[in-house]
Image (tube, helix red, strand yellow):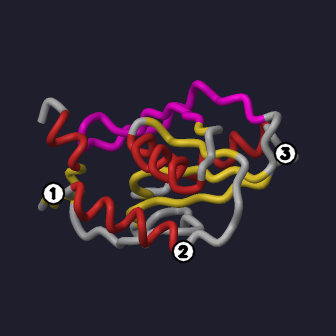
Amino acid sequence: MRYYYSYTEYLSDCRELTAQINDKFDAIVAIARGGITLAHMLGEHYDIREVYTINTIGYNDTEKLDRVEVFNIPDLKQAKNILVVDDIVDSGDTMKLVLQLLSEHYPQCCFRSAALFYKTTAVIKPDWYVRHPEEWIDFFWSVDMGSK
């Protein structure tokens, strides 16, 4: 079963997410690609220009890979409080690994996490989230602009 997640829902959920987040951040790190759109919106909302990406590969289309690859770790030496964002925390493997690697590279930083969707079966719970998905999410940016 698949669910089409529209821009209208996304915008509403971004507003709900910002209403929940009660910390101030120096930087935002998007888990690419899914977190990039959310990081941009949050950067605009909080007037944070220090928006970075970290790349991961954990899925091939809808198939979960055996391990998550992480590369392109951003330079966060100037930041102290950092928000790490992704579109969905599904298994939680990606968010957990990213937070672990960033904490190892930058032990002086405080990392918090946010996602639009969070599955309760995940190995990690983001600090802030909006929805619990029941099915596969087809995000508007993949459907409307992608090759699907």
- Dividing the image into 4 quarters, which one contains the C terminus? top left
**Position of 68 relative to 136 (above/below):** above
For residue 107, which numbered disc appears in the image? 3
**Position of 129 relative to 33 (above/below):** below
Q: Amino acid at mark 3?
A: Pro
Circle 3 crowding by C-alpha within 10 Å: few under 14, some 14–19, many from 20: few
**Position of 27 relative to 19 (above/below):** above
Whole-number angstrom distance, CA of label 1 to CA of label 3: 39 Å
In x, y percent, where is residue 65? 37, 38
- Dividing the image into 4 quarters, which one contains the N terminus? bottom left
Q: Check disc 1 and report the residue beneath it.
A: 4
Identify which residue, 56 or 45, lies in the foreground.
Answer: 45
**Position of 11 relative to 51 (above/below):** below
Q: Quadrant of residue 130?
A: bottom left
In x, y percent, where is residue 45? 52, 56
In x, y percent, where is residue 92? 49, 56
Q: Check disc 2 and report the residue beneath it.
A: 20
Circle 1 crowding by C-alpha within 10 Å: few under 14, some 14–19, many from 20: some
Write the residue at 16% across / 42% down: 143
Residue stretch rendered in magenta on the structure = 52-76
In the image, is residue 70 part of the stretch drawn in magenta?
A: yes
42 relative to 60 in the view: left or right: right
In the image, is residue 77 part of the stretch drawn in magenta?
A: no
Whole-number angstrom distance, CA of label 2 to CA of label 1: 24 Å
Q: Amino acid at mark 2?
A: Gln
Write the residue at 50% across / 41% down: 31
* Dot 1 or dot 3, earlier in sequence: 1
